[in-house]
Image (spheres, helix red, strand yellow):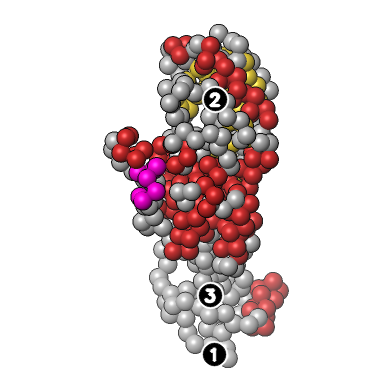
Amino acid sequence: MQTTPLSPEDPAQIGTFELLGRIGHGGMGQVYLGESPGGEPAAVKIIKPSVVDSTTRLRFAQEIEILKTVWGARIAQLLDADAEAEQPWLATEYVEGPDLGKHVVTHGPLPALLVLSLGATLAEGLGYVHKQGLLHRDLKPANILLGPNGPKIIDFGLAVFAESSASLTAANTVVGTPSCMPPEQANGVKPLTSAVDVYALGTVLLFAATGHLPYHANNIHVLFHMVTDPATAPDLTGAPPELVPLLTAMLSHNAQDRPTITEVVQQCRGLVEAQGLKLAQARRRLTTYTAAPPQDFPTLLPVPVPESATPPAVPVASDPATTQLHDALPTAPGVAEEPAPDTRPTMRLAAPQQAAQAEPPPRPAPAVPVPQDTEDQQSAQNAQDMPRRPRRTGRTPARSLRHSAQARRTAQQLRETYAALAAF
Protein backbone atom coordinates (compact mmCIF):
# COMPACT_ATOMS: atom_id res chain seq x y z
CA MET A 1 0.00 0.00 0.00
CA GLN A 2 1.24 3.48 -0.86
CA THR A 3 1.65 5.97 1.96
CA THR A 4 1.68 9.75 2.03
CA PRO A 5 3.21 12.02 4.71
CA LEU A 6 1.22 12.95 7.81
CA SER A 7 -0.48 16.33 7.83
CA PRO A 8 -0.14 18.78 10.76
CA GLU A 9 -3.67 17.80 11.89
CA ASP A 10 -2.82 14.09 12.13
CA PRO A 11 -1.98 12.59 15.53
CA ALA A 12 1.57 11.39 16.08
CA GLN A 13 0.48 8.36 18.10
CA ILE A 14 -2.66 6.28 18.65
CA GLY A 15 -2.68 3.87 21.56
CA THR A 16 0.79 2.35 21.62
CA PHE A 17 1.29 2.80 17.86
CA GLU A 18 3.48 5.55 16.43
CA LEU A 19 1.96 6.86 13.19
CA LEU A 20 4.31 7.10 10.21
CA GLY A 21 2.13 8.06 7.26
CA ARG A 22 -1.30 7.98 5.64
CA ILE A 23 -2.52 4.90 3.77
CA GLY A 24 -6.04 5.94 2.79
CA HIS A 25 -9.28 7.48 3.96
CA GLY A 26 -13.03 7.15 3.61
CA GLY A 27 -16.22 8.79 4.73
CA MET A 28 -15.95 7.35 8.24
CA GLY A 29 -12.28 7.57 9.03
CA GLN A 30 -8.60 7.58 8.15
CA VAL A 31 -6.15 4.68 7.87
CA TYR A 32 -2.51 5.21 8.87
CA LEU A 33 0.68 3.23 8.67
CA GLY A 34 1.73 2.69 12.26
CA GLU A 35 4.49 0.93 14.16
CA SER A 36 4.22 -0.90 17.47
CA PRO A 37 6.78 -0.40 20.27
CA GLY A 38 8.40 -3.63 19.12
CA GLY A 39 8.71 -2.40 15.53
CA GLU A 40 5.73 -4.30 14.08
CA PRO A 41 4.09 -2.42 11.17
CA ALA A 42 0.32 -2.02 11.40
CA ALA A 43 -2.61 -0.47 9.56
CA VAL A 44 -4.28 1.81 12.11
CA LYS A 45 -7.89 2.79 11.40
CA ILE A 46 -9.31 5.83 13.22
CA ILE A 47 -12.89 7.11 13.20
CA LYS A 48 -13.17 10.81 12.36
CA PRO A 49 -14.23 12.99 15.31
CA SER A 50 -16.99 14.53 13.17
CA VAL A 51 -18.82 11.19 12.82
CA VAL A 52 -18.27 9.73 16.29
CA ASP A 53 -21.65 9.06 17.93
CA SER A 54 -23.27 6.17 19.79
CA THR A 55 -24.29 4.35 16.60
CA THR A 56 -20.83 4.70 15.06
CA ARG A 57 -19.18 3.43 18.25
CA LEU A 58 -21.55 0.45 18.33
CA ARG A 59 -20.81 -0.42 14.71
CA PHE A 60 -17.07 0.01 15.29
CA ALA A 61 -17.22 -2.19 18.37
CA GLN A 62 -19.00 -4.84 16.27
CA GLU A 63 -16.22 -4.70 13.67
CA ILE A 64 -13.63 -5.21 16.43
CA GLU A 65 -15.51 -8.22 17.82
CA ILE A 66 -15.79 -9.74 14.35
CA LEU A 67 -12.06 -9.27 13.74
CA LYS A 68 -11.42 -11.09 17.01
CA THR A 69 -13.51 -13.97 15.69
CA VAL A 70 -12.27 -14.41 12.12
CA TRP A 71 -8.94 -16.05 11.42
CA GLY A 72 -6.95 -17.58 8.59
CA ALA A 73 -3.96 -16.96 6.35
CA ARG A 74 -6.07 -14.80 3.98
CA ILE A 75 -7.36 -12.44 6.68
CA ALA A 76 -5.45 -9.35 7.86
CA GLN A 77 -5.32 -10.12 11.59
CA LEU A 78 -6.40 -7.76 14.39
CA LEU A 79 -3.51 -6.52 16.56
CA ASP A 80 -5.17 -4.14 19.03
CA ALA A 81 -8.19 -1.84 19.32
CA ASP A 82 -10.09 0.57 21.56
CA ALA A 83 -13.72 1.33 20.70
CA GLU A 84 -14.14 3.48 23.84
CA ALA A 85 -11.32 5.93 23.12
CA GLU A 86 -12.11 9.55 22.35
CA GLN A 87 -11.20 8.64 18.77
CA PRO A 88 -12.11 4.95 18.37
CA TRP A 89 -9.36 3.01 16.63
CA LEU A 90 -8.21 -0.46 15.66
CA ALA A 91 -4.89 -1.79 14.36
CA THR A 92 -4.55 -4.73 12.00
CA GLU A 93 -1.69 -6.52 10.30
CA TYR A 94 -0.06 -4.30 7.67
CA VAL A 95 0.02 -5.90 4.20
CA GLU A 96 2.79 -4.53 1.98
CA GLY A 97 1.24 -4.32 -1.47
CA PRO A 98 -1.47 -2.60 -3.56
CA ASP A 99 -5.12 -3.51 -3.52
CA LEU A 100 -6.46 -5.47 -6.48
CA GLY A 101 -8.31 -2.45 -7.86
CA LYS A 102 -5.19 -0.28 -8.07
CA HIS A 103 -3.09 -3.12 -9.48
CA VAL A 104 -5.51 -3.84 -12.34
CA VAL A 105 -6.03 -0.16 -13.14
CA THR A 106 -2.26 0.39 -13.22
CA HIS A 107 -1.04 -2.81 -14.88
CA GLY A 108 -4.08 -4.29 -16.61
CA PRO A 109 -6.10 -7.49 -16.04
CA LEU A 110 -4.48 -10.66 -14.73
CA PRO A 111 -3.95 -13.73 -16.95
CA ALA A 112 -6.72 -16.36 -16.64
CA LEU A 113 -4.48 -18.81 -14.77
CA LEU A 114 -3.72 -16.21 -12.09
CA VAL A 115 -7.39 -15.25 -11.81
CA LEU A 116 -8.19 -18.90 -11.06
CA SER A 117 -5.45 -18.99 -8.44
CA LEU A 118 -6.83 -15.78 -6.92
CA GLY A 119 -10.33 -17.28 -6.91
CA ALA A 120 -9.28 -20.48 -5.16
CA THR A 121 -7.20 -18.59 -2.58
CA LEU A 122 -9.90 -16.05 -1.71
CA ALA A 123 -12.70 -18.62 -1.73
CA GLU A 124 -10.79 -20.78 0.72
CA GLY A 125 -10.20 -17.73 2.93
CA LEU A 126 -13.91 -16.86 2.85
CA GLY A 127 -14.68 -20.48 3.74
CA TYR A 128 -12.92 -20.00 7.08
CA VAL A 129 -14.94 -16.82 7.65
CA HIS A 130 -18.18 -18.65 6.92
CA LYS A 131 -17.24 -21.44 9.33
CA GLN A 132 -17.36 -18.82 12.09
CA GLY A 133 -20.94 -18.05 11.06
CA LEU A 134 -19.91 -14.73 9.53
CA LEU A 135 -20.42 -12.99 6.19
CA HIS A 136 -18.15 -10.30 4.80
CA ARG A 137 -20.90 -8.45 2.87
CA ASP A 138 -18.54 -5.91 1.26
CA LEU A 139 -16.08 -7.91 -0.81
CA LYS A 140 -14.69 -5.77 -3.66
CA PRO A 141 -11.35 -5.19 -5.47
CA ALA A 142 -10.35 -2.43 -3.02
CA ASN A 143 -10.71 -4.87 -0.10
CA ILE A 144 -8.26 -7.41 -1.56
CA LEU A 145 -4.62 -6.60 -0.79
CA LEU A 146 -1.93 -8.26 -2.92
CA GLY A 147 0.78 -8.87 -0.35
CA PRO A 148 4.15 -10.65 -0.63
CA ASN A 149 2.62 -13.80 0.90
CA GLY A 150 -0.46 -13.80 -1.29
CA PRO A 151 -3.79 -11.93 -1.33
CA LYS A 152 -5.50 -10.95 1.93
CA ILE A 153 -9.03 -9.82 2.71
CA ILE A 154 -9.56 -6.63 4.71
CA ASP A 155 -12.38 -4.40 6.01
CA PHE A 156 -14.96 -6.38 7.96
CA GLY A 157 -16.85 -3.21 8.88
CA LEU A 158 -20.05 -4.50 7.26
CA ALA A 159 -19.66 -8.13 8.28
CA VAL A 160 -22.60 -9.76 10.02
CA PHE A 161 -23.51 -13.12 11.47
CA ALA A 162 -25.13 -15.19 8.74
CA GLU A 163 -28.26 -16.25 10.63
CA SER A 164 -28.96 -12.85 12.18
CA SER A 165 -31.76 -10.64 10.88
CA ALA A 166 -30.75 -7.80 13.22
CA SER A 167 -28.99 -4.81 11.74
CA LEU A 168 -27.46 -1.53 12.81
CA THR A 169 -28.58 -0.04 9.51
CA ALA A 170 -31.50 2.37 9.50
CA ALA A 171 -34.75 1.16 8.03
CA ASN A 172 -34.97 1.14 4.21
CA THR A 173 -31.20 1.72 4.01
CA VAL A 174 -28.80 -0.55 2.13
CA VAL A 175 -25.09 -0.46 2.86
CA GLY A 176 -22.35 -1.86 0.69
CA THR A 177 -20.84 -1.31 -2.74
CA PRO A 178 -23.68 -1.42 -5.32
CA SER A 179 -21.56 -2.58 -8.28
CA CYS A 180 -20.35 -5.61 -6.26
CA MET A 181 -23.63 -6.25 -4.39
CA PRO A 182 -25.84 -9.30 -5.06
CA PRO A 183 -29.51 -8.67 -5.89
CA GLU A 184 -30.84 -9.95 -2.56
CA GLN A 185 -28.56 -7.60 -0.61
CA ALA A 186 -29.56 -4.67 -2.85
CA ASN A 187 -33.23 -5.54 -2.23
CA GLY A 188 -32.71 -5.54 1.55
CA VAL A 189 -33.51 -9.26 1.97
CA LYS A 190 -32.76 -10.68 5.45
CA PRO A 191 -31.28 -12.87 6.66
CA LEU A 192 -28.51 -13.11 4.09
CA THR A 193 -26.59 -16.31 3.34
CA SER A 194 -23.05 -17.16 2.27
CA ALA A 195 -24.24 -16.81 -1.35
CA VAL A 196 -23.76 -13.02 -1.02
CA ASP A 197 -20.01 -13.49 -0.67
CA VAL A 198 -19.96 -15.96 -3.58
CA TYR A 199 -21.59 -13.32 -5.80
CA ALA A 200 -19.24 -10.58 -4.59
CA LEU A 201 -16.23 -12.84 -5.20
CA GLY A 202 -17.53 -13.35 -8.74
CA THR A 203 -17.45 -9.57 -9.28
CA VAL A 204 -13.88 -9.45 -7.93
CA LEU A 205 -12.72 -12.23 -10.28
CA LEU A 206 -14.49 -10.63 -13.26
CA PHE A 207 -12.72 -7.34 -12.50
CA ALA A 208 -9.36 -9.12 -12.13
CA ALA A 209 -9.82 -10.79 -15.53
CA THR A 210 -11.32 -7.88 -17.51
CA GLY A 211 -10.85 -4.62 -15.62
CA HIS A 212 -14.59 -3.98 -15.28
CA LEU A 213 -17.46 -4.99 -12.98
CA PRO A 214 -20.65 -6.82 -14.02
CA TYR A 215 -22.81 -3.67 -13.92
CA HIS A 216 -21.76 -0.07 -14.46
CA ALA A 217 -23.82 3.11 -14.74
CA ASN A 218 -23.26 6.76 -13.91
CA ASN A 219 -26.52 7.03 -11.99
CA ILE A 220 -26.80 5.13 -8.70
CA HIS A 221 -30.51 4.48 -9.21
CA VAL A 222 -29.91 3.04 -12.68
CA LEU A 223 -27.16 0.87 -11.23
CA PHE A 224 -29.45 -0.52 -8.50
CA HIS A 225 -32.09 -1.27 -11.12
CA MET A 226 -29.59 -3.20 -13.26
CA VAL A 227 -28.40 -5.23 -10.26
CA THR A 228 -31.91 -6.15 -9.09
CA ASP A 229 -33.48 -6.72 -12.53
CA PRO A 230 -33.44 -10.47 -13.33
CA ALA A 231 -33.69 -9.68 -17.05
CA THR A 232 -30.42 -7.69 -17.07
CA ALA A 233 -27.51 -10.09 -17.44
CA PRO A 234 -24.08 -9.21 -16.05
CA ASP A 235 -21.54 -7.86 -18.53
CA LEU A 236 -18.88 -10.55 -19.08
CA THR A 237 -17.26 -8.80 -22.04
CA GLY A 238 -13.57 -9.66 -22.30
CA ALA A 239 -13.69 -12.58 -19.87
CA PRO A 240 -11.46 -15.52 -20.95
CA PRO A 241 -13.65 -18.36 -22.34
CA GLU A 242 -12.47 -20.83 -19.68
CA LEU A 243 -13.71 -18.50 -16.93
CA VAL A 244 -17.14 -17.68 -18.37
CA PRO A 245 -19.06 -20.73 -17.04
CA LEU A 246 -17.74 -20.22 -13.49
CA LEU A 247 -18.34 -16.45 -13.51
CA THR A 248 -21.84 -16.92 -14.95
CA ALA A 249 -22.74 -19.32 -12.14
CA MET A 250 -21.24 -17.13 -9.39
CA LEU A 251 -23.13 -14.08 -10.70
CA SER A 252 -26.49 -15.84 -10.94
CA HIS A 253 -29.42 -13.61 -10.03
CA ASN A 254 -30.91 -16.23 -7.69
CA ALA A 255 -28.79 -17.09 -4.66
CA GLN A 256 -29.70 -20.80 -4.82
CA ASP A 257 -28.27 -21.06 -8.36
CA ARG A 258 -24.77 -20.04 -7.29
CA PRO A 259 -22.08 -22.59 -6.37
CA THR A 260 -21.06 -22.93 -2.74
CA ILE A 261 -17.75 -21.45 -1.64
CA THR A 262 -16.30 -24.98 -1.50
CA GLU A 263 -17.43 -25.68 -5.06
CA VAL A 264 -15.73 -22.46 -6.21
CA VAL A 265 -12.43 -23.72 -4.78
CA GLN A 266 -12.90 -27.12 -6.48
CA GLN A 267 -13.78 -25.62 -9.87
CA CYS A 268 -10.84 -23.21 -9.80
CA ARG A 269 -8.56 -26.08 -8.83
CA GLY A 270 -9.88 -28.26 -11.66
CA LEU A 271 -9.34 -25.53 -14.26
CA VAL A 272 -5.79 -24.91 -13.04
CA GLU A 273 -4.90 -28.61 -13.08
CA ALA A 274 -6.35 -28.89 -16.59
CA GLN A 275 -3.50 -26.59 -17.65
CA GLY A 276 -0.92 -28.96 -16.20
CA LEU A 277 -0.16 -27.09 -12.97
CA LYS A 278 -0.83 -27.70 -9.32
CA LEU A 279 -2.76 -25.02 -7.47
CA ALA A 280 0.21 -24.30 -5.20
CA GLN A 281 2.34 -23.58 -8.28
CA ALA A 282 -0.30 -21.22 -9.66
CA ARG A 283 -0.47 -19.44 -6.31
CA ARG A 284 3.29 -18.87 -6.31
CA ARG A 285 3.03 -17.47 -9.83
CA LEU A 286 0.27 -15.12 -8.70
CA THR A 287 2.36 -13.82 -5.80
CA THR A 288 5.42 -13.35 -8.02
CA TYR A 289 3.38 -11.61 -10.72
CA THR A 290 1.65 -9.16 -8.39
CA ALA A 291 4.83 -8.41 -6.44
CA ALA A 292 6.45 -6.93 -9.57
CA PRO A 293 4.87 -4.86 -12.34
CA PRO A 294 3.93 -7.10 -15.30
CA GLN A 295 6.33 -5.29 -17.63
CA ASP A 296 9.18 -6.35 -15.32
CA PHE A 297 7.90 -9.91 -14.88
CA PRO A 298 10.06 -11.42 -17.70
CA THR A 299 13.21 -10.12 -15.98
CA LEU A 300 12.50 -12.53 -13.14
CA LEU A 301 13.46 -15.36 -15.49
CA PRO A 302 17.11 -16.43 -15.88
CA VAL A 303 19.03 -14.50 -18.53
CA PRO A 304 19.69 -16.91 -21.45
CA VAL A 305 23.35 -17.51 -22.27
CA PRO A 306 24.40 -18.86 -25.69
CA GLU A 307 25.81 -22.36 -25.56
CA SER A 308 29.02 -21.23 -27.22
CA ALA A 309 29.63 -18.42 -24.76
CA THR A 310 32.10 -18.69 -21.93
CA PRO A 311 30.31 -19.15 -18.56
CA PRO A 312 30.07 -15.76 -16.82
CA ALA A 313 32.22 -15.15 -13.79
CA VAL A 314 29.65 -12.64 -12.45
CA PRO A 315 26.42 -14.58 -11.67
CA VAL A 316 23.23 -13.21 -13.18
CA ALA A 317 20.76 -13.18 -10.28
CA SER A 318 16.99 -13.41 -10.70
CA ASP A 319 16.48 -10.31 -8.54
CA PRO A 320 15.23 -7.48 -10.80
CA ALA A 321 17.65 -4.90 -9.39
CA THR A 322 20.60 -7.23 -9.95
CA THR A 323 19.35 -8.05 -13.45
CA GLN A 324 19.16 -4.36 -14.33
CA LEU A 325 22.66 -3.82 -12.92
CA HIS A 326 23.99 -6.71 -14.97
CA ASP A 327 22.33 -5.36 -18.11
CA ALA A 328 23.99 -1.97 -17.52
CA LEU A 329 27.50 -3.40 -17.69
CA PRO A 330 29.24 -2.79 -21.05
CA THR A 331 29.91 -6.46 -21.58
CA ALA A 332 29.56 -9.41 -23.86
CA PRO A 333 28.12 -12.68 -22.44
CA GLY A 334 30.88 -13.39 -19.89
CA VAL A 335 34.49 -13.35 -18.72
CA ALA A 336 36.76 -15.72 -16.84
CA GLU A 337 39.24 -14.28 -14.36
CA GLU A 338 41.90 -16.90 -15.22
CA PRO A 339 41.27 -18.00 -18.82
CA ALA A 340 42.31 -21.42 -20.01
CA PRO A 341 45.51 -21.50 -22.14
CA ASP A 342 43.59 -21.60 -25.42
CA THR A 343 40.98 -18.96 -24.60
CA ARG A 344 40.85 -15.27 -23.78
CA PRO A 345 38.14 -13.07 -22.23
CA THR A 346 35.20 -12.09 -24.41
CA MET A 347 34.53 -9.13 -22.04
CA ARG A 348 35.90 -5.85 -23.39
CA LEU A 349 36.06 -2.83 -21.07
CA ALA A 350 38.64 -0.03 -21.23
CA ALA A 351 41.54 -2.37 -21.99
CA PRO A 352 44.07 -1.28 -24.64
CA GLN A 353 42.81 -1.88 -28.15
CA GLN A 354 44.38 -4.75 -30.04
CA ALA A 355 44.26 -5.33 -33.76
CA ALA A 356 41.82 -8.09 -34.62
CA GLN A 357 43.24 -10.95 -36.61
CA ALA A 358 41.68 -14.06 -38.00
CA GLU A 359 42.78 -17.23 -36.27
CA PRO A 360 44.90 -19.42 -38.57
CA PRO A 361 43.70 -22.96 -39.24
CA PRO A 362 45.29 -25.68 -37.08
CA ARG A 363 48.78 -26.66 -38.18
CA PRO A 364 51.17 -29.31 -36.91
CA ALA A 365 53.67 -26.70 -35.72
CA PRO A 366 52.54 -23.75 -33.57
CA ALA A 367 52.63 -20.31 -35.15
CA VAL A 368 54.26 -18.82 -32.05
CA PRO A 369 57.57 -19.78 -30.44
CA VAL A 370 57.34 -22.72 -28.06
CA PRO A 371 57.73 -21.51 -24.42
CA GLN A 372 61.09 -22.48 -22.92
CA ASP A 373 60.23 -22.51 -19.20
CA THR A 374 58.60 -25.53 -17.59
CA GLU A 375 55.32 -23.79 -16.70
CA ASP A 376 54.77 -22.54 -20.24
CA GLN A 377 55.70 -25.95 -21.69
CA GLN A 378 53.08 -27.59 -19.49
CA SER A 379 50.52 -24.96 -20.49
CA ALA A 380 51.25 -25.57 -24.15
CA GLN A 381 50.96 -29.34 -23.68
CA ASN A 382 47.64 -28.93 -21.84
CA ALA A 383 46.36 -26.76 -24.67
CA GLN A 384 47.16 -29.52 -27.18
CA ASP A 385 45.56 -32.24 -25.03
CA MET A 386 42.31 -30.32 -24.32
CA PRO A 387 39.41 -30.57 -26.81
CA ARG A 388 39.52 -27.59 -29.10
CA ARG A 389 36.65 -25.13 -28.49
CA PRO A 390 35.07 -22.97 -31.21
CA ARG A 391 36.64 -19.56 -31.44
CA ARG A 392 35.25 -16.34 -32.80
CA THR A 393 36.91 -14.40 -35.60
CA GLY A 394 39.08 -11.69 -34.16
CA ARG A 395 40.09 -13.56 -31.01
CA THR A 396 43.78 -14.15 -30.37
CA PRO A 397 44.90 -17.31 -28.53
CA ALA A 398 46.04 -16.49 -24.99
CA ARG A 399 49.28 -18.45 -24.79
CA SER A 400 51.56 -16.18 -22.81
CA LEU A 401 51.80 -14.75 -19.34
CA ARG A 402 51.27 -11.30 -20.87
CA HIS A 403 47.78 -12.34 -21.97
CA SER A 404 47.02 -13.82 -18.53
CA ALA A 405 48.05 -10.59 -16.82
CA GLN A 406 45.85 -8.65 -19.21
CA ALA A 407 42.94 -10.95 -18.39
CA ARG A 408 43.45 -10.28 -14.71
CA ARG A 409 43.43 -6.54 -15.35
CA THR A 410 40.23 -6.91 -17.38
CA ALA A 411 38.60 -8.88 -14.56
CA GLN A 412 39.64 -6.21 -12.06
CA GLN A 413 38.08 -3.52 -14.26
CA LEU A 414 34.90 -5.58 -14.40
CA ARG A 415 34.76 -5.79 -10.61
CA GLU A 416 35.34 -2.04 -10.28
CA THR A 417 32.60 -1.30 -12.85
CA TYR A 418 30.18 -3.67 -11.07
CA ALA A 419 30.95 -2.03 -7.70
CA ALA A 420 30.42 1.46 -9.10
CA LEU A 421 26.98 0.51 -10.45
CA ALA A 422 25.84 -1.49 -7.46
CA ALA A 423 23.07 -0.01 -5.33
CA PHE A 424 24.58 -1.21 -2.07
Crowding at label 1, few (<14), some or many (≥20) Cα neighbours within 10 Å?
Answer: few
The residue shown at (37%, 45%) is 229
Nearest to the observer: residue 222 or residue 30: 222
Residue 159 to residue 217: above or below:
above
Q: Residue under label 1, please give it.
A: 363
Can you give x and y, in whole percent of width and height, for residue 289 in the image? 51, 52
Q: Earlier in the sequence, mark 2 or mark 3?
A: 2
The residue shown at (65%, 21%) is 80
Q: Residue under label 2, please give it.
A: 167
Q: CA distance from mark 1 to mark 2?
A: 95 Å
Q: CA distance from mark 2 to mark 3?
A: 72 Å
Residue 58 in view, yes or no: yes
The residue shown at (54%, 56%) is 116
Side of 208 relative to 229 (left or right): right
Can you give x and y, in whole percent of width and height, for residue 261 in the image? 60, 49
Q: Earlier in the sequence, mark 1 or mark 2?
A: 2
Q: CA distance from mark 3 to mark 1?
A: 23 Å
Q: Residue under label 3, please give it.
A: 308
Asked whether disc 1 touches disc 2, contact meaning CB atoms under 8 Å apart, the reply is no
Can you give x and y, in whole percent of width and height, for residue 87 in the image? 54, 12
Q: Which residues are magenta?
A: 226-232
